[in-house]
Image (cartoon, helix red, strand yellow):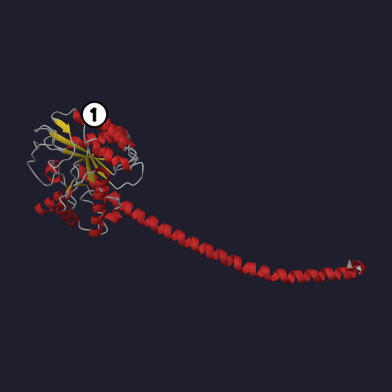
């Protein structure tokens, strides 16, 4: 209302004055914004950069672990076929059975296994890493063929998997231990961590099944190159606890990822055939959801084995012949 009595020049002057006052208020805010926004962005980018660096470091560590595991698996694959002893020595096919089978010669192939006639060649199908969503299917296949196997289980707390421990035991299969965590870094970090892991799994199995397991398979086998602890110390501890550890002298090769059903089948058959006919066979297979090709190949593997003369598929018992890579390495070294 007051502006109505002003001349146009006076009105323009007043508008300019108001704009100046407004600019005086806006300029500091703009300056402050120009200072704060880059600062905030720098802080945010700095935090994000640090997070990315940490992620990269973790990925690098995981890659290093994976490389070690892959190296170890390559050694194991060589060991299956009698080519690698762990100390750089290559052994011939004729030496294979003596070196792999605990460094022993003259294995008694007529050992008595509960429910099995003497004089038979025994084949032990052993499944690592379970239970899993594939366990029921494996149990169904084994039941269809009327054979028993050995499951070296880990510690699974998933509600869908917990009942599988009892199903394995109730079906008459042997339950062995394969570490609770199956974390190489955690399990093999120290002797104490190994003991704690073992005791936790042994009690866990007992709580779920009533079975006090005294069979063990080291993740990566007893000849693994991942452990930071002397494997001899861990083996000594198992001996003190009256626990027998088992490796293998045949494999379906499913430690490698992405293999087809036919690849797993033919690898298993080739590995089986490489073991002398008078020597018992402990075959390594895996029980996990990403080993569906193993499950698909299992019926054919079982049929091939059962078609052999004087051969039976049985579970590991106290009377089973042990197959231990670590003893094989020590034997080879002592002969050098």
Q: Residue at x 27, y 58 (%)?
A: 189
Q: Examine the rendering and report whether any part of residue 105 can be seen.
A: yes
Residue in the foreground of this view, choosing between 36 and 235:
235
Residue in the foreground of this view, choosing between 77 and 89:
77
Q: Could you tell me which quadrant the N terminus lies in?
A: bottom right
Instruction: Please tell me whether residue 50 is drawn above or below residue 262 in the rendered image.
Output: below
Residue 218 percent across, percent down from the top left: 23, 49
Residue 225 percent across, percent down from the top left: 24, 53
Residue in the foreground of this view, choosing between 95 and 222:
222
Residue 13 lies in quadrant? bottom right
Mark 1: give few (<14), some (14-19) or many (20+) Cα within 10 Å. Answer: few
Residue 62 percent across, percent down from the top left: 36, 54
Instruction: Please tell me whether residue 41 is drawn above or below residue 215 in the rendered image.
Output: below
Residue in the foreground of this view, choosing between 199 and 18:
199
Q: What SS does tag 1 mark?
A: helix
* Residue under pointer 1: 145
């Amino acid at each position: 209302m007051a502006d109505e009595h002003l001349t146009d020049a006076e009105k323009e002057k007043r508008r300019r004055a108001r704009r100046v006052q407004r600019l005086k208020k806006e300029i500091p805010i703009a300056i402050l914004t120009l200072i704060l926004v880059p600062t905030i962005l720098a802080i945010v980018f700095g935090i994000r950069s640090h997070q990315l660096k940490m992620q990269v470091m973790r990925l690098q560590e995981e890659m290093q672990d994976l490389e070690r595991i892959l190296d170890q698996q390559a050694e194991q694959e060589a060991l299956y076929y009698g080519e690698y002893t762990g100390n750089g020595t290559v052994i011939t096919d004729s030496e294979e059975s003596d070196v792999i089978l605990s460094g022993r010669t003259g294995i008694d192939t007529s050992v008595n296994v509960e429910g099995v006639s003497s004089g038979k060649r025994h084949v032990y199908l052993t499944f690592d890493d379970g239970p899993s969503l594939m366990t029921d299917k494996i149990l169904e296949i084994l039941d269809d063929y009327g054979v028993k196997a050995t499951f070296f289980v880990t510690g699974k707390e998933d509600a869908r998997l917990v009942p599988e421990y009892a199903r394995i035991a109730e079906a008459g299969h042997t339950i062995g231990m394969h570490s609770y965590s199956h974390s190489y870094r955690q399990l093999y970090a120290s002797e104490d961590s190994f003991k704690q892991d073992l005791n936790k799994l042994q009690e866990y199995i007992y709580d779920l099944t009533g079975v006090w397991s005294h069979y063990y398979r080291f993740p990566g086998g007893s000849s693994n190159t991942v452990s930071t602890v002397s494997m001899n110390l861990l083996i000594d501890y198992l001996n003190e606890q009256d626990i027998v550890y088992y490796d293998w002298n045949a494999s379906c090769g499913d430690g490698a990822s992405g293999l087809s059903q036919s690849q797993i089948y033919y690898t298993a058959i080739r590995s089986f055939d490489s073991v002398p006919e008078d020597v018992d066979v402990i075959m390594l297979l895996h029980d996990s959801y990403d080993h569906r090709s193993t499950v698909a190949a299992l019926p054919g593997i079982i049929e091939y084995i059962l078609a052999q003369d004087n051969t039976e598929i049985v579970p590991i018992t106290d009377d089973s012949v042990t197959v231990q890579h670590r003893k094989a390495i020590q034997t080879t070294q002592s002969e050098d």
